Image (cartoon, rainbow, N blue to C red):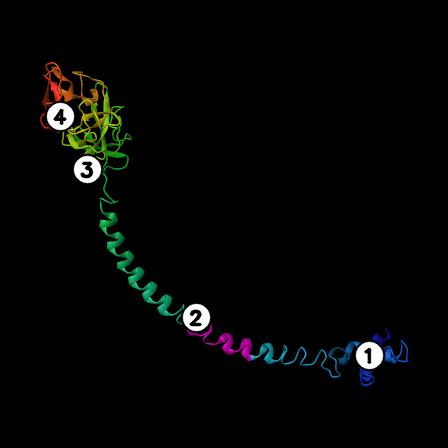
């Protein structure tokens, strides 16, 4: 521990003397005749820690502090190592015009140039978003035939009790165009669909586009039928052939499908086959109960294979008569199969 008390100049002097002497720390440390506490021992220790020959293998100062060791030009500090111009900081490396900083790279024709994002032809030019021909032009969204025309969204609705169109249904909210004494008039709307039984409270409670029609006082029965002007208005497949009393408003018949109404009937999965139009077209609907000459208001009162006739000779007035095929059906007794005016000649009724 004595060597730690020596001044730095003395330690360096001892180390220098030892280096110039025998040249090996084993000879001076262990082979000296001065013993464990001799000058050779201390000089050896000094040479162990500080002498260049210990770590660098030579006698020069190229041990730990020499320029060519850690701080030398090829290593860390000199320009050729990390700070040299051609390495990372020079103009050709990061700051060169062809890389990032000059207009040619990112700031010129790439993102900021007029013909890239800001040019008139791209987003700001009139023919693109601001021109009348694109979104703001009258023929596109604002022209009357598009959204503002009455038949589209801005139609003027008719108030309660006002005249209206039974097919167009142009009455205001919560109203429908119905019929009052044969005239079209805006009345309270209903919720019974076409073909449904209606008038339970004595009012027309059918949905818009349909009207409650009285069918028979005997059952009694009233049904919702479509208003119509032409056959195409009859969404159920009926025909626009009936006119309401008191005016010229028309409603559709029951659906027409060409079933066979003469017993034995065919062509109906449900109900019976009846004559559904004044000109003898046939279709299916609910079956009544009346047989020959049973009192009737409509075909709904007659059973399948019969039709309600208002002036039947056999019945001395209105009654259900049997359907037949002239020249084919044997009506029985004194009855014959007669053609009906306007019907096809293959369809008739049995009467006296």
Residue for point 26% across, 59% down? 133
Q: Main secondary structure of the magenta part?
A: helix
Residue for point 55% across, 77% down? 87
**Residue span colored magenta:** 85-105
Q: Nearer the viewer, mark 3 or mark 1?
A: 1
Left or right side of 106 for 224: left
* Disc 4 to disc 2, C-alpha distance: 91 Å
Q: Mark 3 Cα within 10 Å, few/some/many (few <14, many 20+)?
A: few
Q: Mark 2 Cα within 10 Å, few/some/many (few <14, many 20+)?
A: some
Residue 35 horizontal/vertical position (percent): 90, 77
Which residue corresponds to mark 2? 106
Whether residue 160 is visible = no
* In magenta stretch: residue 92: yes
Depth check: 48 or 291 in front?
291
Which residue corresponds to mark 1? 25
Q: For residue 161, what is the image quadrant?
A: top left
Q: Is residue 189 above or below residue 310?
A: below
Residue 88 horizontal/vertical position (percent): 55, 75
* Disc 3 to disc 1, C-alpha distance: 123 Å
Are the residues flagged by discs 2 and 1 in contact, CB closer than 8 Å?
no
Label 2: element kind: helix
Label 4: element kind: loop
Q: For residue 320, what is the image quadrant?
A: top left
Question: Looking at the image, is mark 2 or mark 3 earlier in the sequence?
Answer: 2
- Figure quadrant of the N terminus: bottom right
* Disc 1 to disc 4, C-alpha distance: 142 Å
Which residue corresponds to mark 4? 347
Which residue corresponds to mark 3? 232
* In magenta stretch: residue 149: no
- Figure quadrant of the C terminus: top left
Depth check: 131 or 111 in front?
111
Question: Looking at the image, is mark 1 or mark 4 earlier in the sequence?
Answer: 1
């Amino acid at each position: 521990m004595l060597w730690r008390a020596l001044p730095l100049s003395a330690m360096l002097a001892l180390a220098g003397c030892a280096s110039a002497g025998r040249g090996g720390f084993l000879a001076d440390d262990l082979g000296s005749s001065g013993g464990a506490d001799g000058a050779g021992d201390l000089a050896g220790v000094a040479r162990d820690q500080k002498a260049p020959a210990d770590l660098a293998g030579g006698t020069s100062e190229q041990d730990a502090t020499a320029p060519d060791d850690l701080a030398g030009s090829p290593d860390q500090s000199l320009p050729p190592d990390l700070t040299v111009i051609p390495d990372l900081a020079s103009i050709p490396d990061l700051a060169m015009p062809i890389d990032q900083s000059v207009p040619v790279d990112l700031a010129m024709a790439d993102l900021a140039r007029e013909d890239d994002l800001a040019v008139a032809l791209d987003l700001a030019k009139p023919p693109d978003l601001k021109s009348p021909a694109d979104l703001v032009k009258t023929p596109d969204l604002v022209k009357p035939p598009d959204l503002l025309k009455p038949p589209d969204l801005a139609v003027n609705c008719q108030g309660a009790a006002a005249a209206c169109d039974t097919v167009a249904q142009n009455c205001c909210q919560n109203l429908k165009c119905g019929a009052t004494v044969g005239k079209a008039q805006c009345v309270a709307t209903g919720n019974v669909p076409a073909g449904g039984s209606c008038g339970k409270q004595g009012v027309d409670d059918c949905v818009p586009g349909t009207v409650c029609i009285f069918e028979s006082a005997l059952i009694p029965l009233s049904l919702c039928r479509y208003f119509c002007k032409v056959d195409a208005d009859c969404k159920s497949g009926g025909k626009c052939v009936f006119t309401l009393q008191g005016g010229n408003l028309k409603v559709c018949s029951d659906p027409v499908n060409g079933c066979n109404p003469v017993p034995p009937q065919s062509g109906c999965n449900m109900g019976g086959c009846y004559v559904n139009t004044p000109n003898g077209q046939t279709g299916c609907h609910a079956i009544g109960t009346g047989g020959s000459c049973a009192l009737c208001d409509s075909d709904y009162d007659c059973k399948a294979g019969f039709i309600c006739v208002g002036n039947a000779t056999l019945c001395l007035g209105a009654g259900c008569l049997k359907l037949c095929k002239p020249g084919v059906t044997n009506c029985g007794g004194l009855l014959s199969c007669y053609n009906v005016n306007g019907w096809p000649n293959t369809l008739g009724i049995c009467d006296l």
